[in-house]
Amino acid sequence: ESFFHWAFGGLEPDWFGAIEVQTGRSILFTHHLPDDVAVYDGMPDTPEAMAIKYAVEEAYYSEE
């Protein structure tokens, strides 16, 4: 969705994001990928690495 890309910069499917309007705090939610995906795509980023990469305050797996 173009608004998601505009707000968070992420192009990956099935991600979610939240923005707290009063403070501007942003949170990114992604799915935890199975370890066998690493064979094809490399190791997925941790939530901490995603928070840095996409400049959000917090990032979590949506399963948490």
Image (spheres, helix red, strand yellow):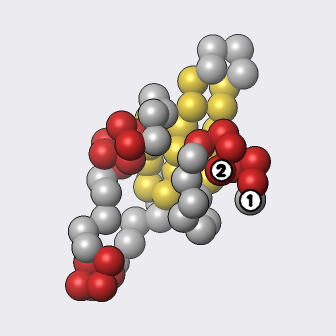
Q: Which mark is residue 18?
A: none
Secondary element at image label 2: helix
Q: Residue, x 59% and y 43% (percent of image)?
A: 8
Q: Which image quadrant: the N terminus?
A: bottom right
Label 2 is placed on what type of residue?
A: His
Location of residue 62 in the rendering, given as x and y in whole percent from the top left corner: 51, 57
Residue furthest to the top: 22
Quarter of the image where one finds residue 12: bottom right
Is residue 35 visible from the viewing direction of this image? no
User: Would you place residue 28 above or below residue 32 in this image?
Assistant: above
Q: Residue, x 38% and y 72% (percent of image)?
A: 33
Q: Which mark is residue 1?
A: 1
Left or right relative to 28: residue 45: left
Secondary element at image label 1: loop
Label 1 is placed on what type of residue?
A: Glu
User: Would you place residue 56 above or below residue 42 in this image?
Assistant: above
Q: CA distance from mark 1 to mark 2?
A: 7 Å
Q: Which mark is residue 5?
A: 2
Location of residue 2 in the rendering, given as x and y in whole percent from the top left corner: 75, 54
Mark 2, residues whose alpha carbon is within 10 Å: few (<14), some, or many (≥20)? Answer: few
Location of residue 57 in the rendering, given as x and y in whole percent from the top left corner: 45, 29
Relative to the observer, which residue lies in front, 51 or 63? Answer: 51
Relative to the observer, which residue lies in front, 48 or 10? Answer: 10
Q: Are marks 1 and 2 in contact (CB under 8 Å)?
A: yes
Relative to the observer, which residue lies in front, 44 or 9? Answer: 9
User: Would you place residue 45 above or below residue 25 in this image?
Assistant: below
